[in-house]
Image (tube, rainbow, N blue to C red):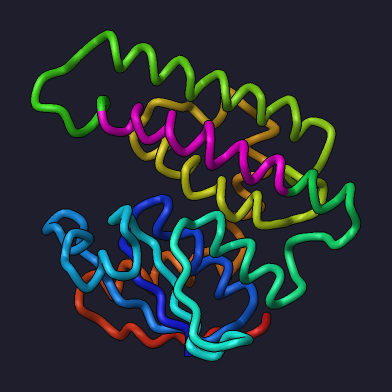
Amino acid sequence: MLKLYTWKTPNGYKVPIMLEELALPYEVIPVDINEGGQMTPEFLAMNPNHKIPVLVDEDAEGGALTIFESGAILMYLAEKSGQFLPTDTVGKYTTIEWLLFQLASVGPMFGQANHFVKHTAERLEYPIARYTKEAQRLMGVMNTRLGTVEYLAGAYSIADIATWPWIRSGIANKHVVLSEYPNVEKWYKAIEARPAVMRAIANVDNAAKGGSAVCIPKFE
C-alpha cells in the first residue's frame, strides 16, 4: 500500500485526489503542520525541505521509493499508471506546461494571498493588494484558456488535479470571486462533481481528525 504523508492544505489534497482517481489503495499519514510535524527528524529524512506531501511507494520498480514535491508525485503516479498524462509529445508537454503554471504561479501567488488575507495579526494592505491582484490575473489567464478547452491541457489531467485545490482555497479565503470567471467556474464545478475529488478531501480531513487513514478507492 502507498503511504501518503500529508495535511489538509491545497498541496496536501492533490495527491489523494490522484490516488482516488486511479483507484489505488493508500494510507494517509497526517502531518500536522500547525504543530510542526513537518519539522521532525523522521519527516526531514524523507523531505529535507520539510514540506508536505511525501509519497512512499514500497513496491516501486527497483525498490522502495520516497518522493517529495507534489508535482513530482503526480508525474510519478501518472507514469506509473499510464493515466492523466498523455504519452504523445504535444499532449504531454501541454500538460506539463499547465502543471508548471500551477506550481510556479497559482500555488505561490494564491498561497501568499491566503496568508495575508487570513493569517496575519494585522491587516497589511500592500501585500493583500499585491497578491490578490496577481491571483485575479491568474484567474483571468485560466478563464481565457478554459474558453477554448474543457480542461487546462485539453483532457482532464494532473494539471487540473494540481490546480483545483488552490482555486478552492482562493474561493474559501474570498480573494477570488468564481462567478467573475465563467469558464473557470464551469471547469471548477465539473471537477468538484467528480466523486474521487470529494472522497479525497474527506479522507484527508478525516485522518487529520484521528479517523481511519486507510483508503481503498473504487472505480466509479
Residue 210 lies in what quarter of the image?
Answer: bottom left
Q: Residue at x 62, y 71 (%)?
A: 77
Residue 157 in the image, given as x and y percentages of width and height: 71, 57
- Bounds of the magenta segment: 96-115
Q: Is residue 171 left or right of residue 45?
A: right
* Frontmost residue, 143 versus 103: 103
The residue positioned farthest toward the top in the image shown: 126
Vertical position of residue 209 compared to residue 150: above or below: below
Residue 55 in the image, given as x and y percentages of width and height: 45, 72
The residue positioned farthest toward the front in the image shown: 62
Residue 98 belongs to the span the image colors magenta:
yes
Q: Is residue 35 left or right of residue 60?
A: left
Residue 19 in the image, given as x and y percentages of width and height: 56, 74
Q: Residue at x 64, y 50 (%)?
A: 160
- The total number of labels drawn is 0
Vertical position of residue 78 compared to residue 11: above or below: below
Vertical position of residue 58 compared to residue 90: above or below: below
Q: Residue at x 26, y 26 (%)?
A: 117
* Frontmost residue, 104 versus 211: 104
Question: What secondary structure is the magenta-colored segment mainly?
Answer: helix
Residue 111 belongs to the span the image colors magenta:
yes
* Frontmost residue, 34 versus 64: 64
Quadrant occupied by the C terminus: bottom right
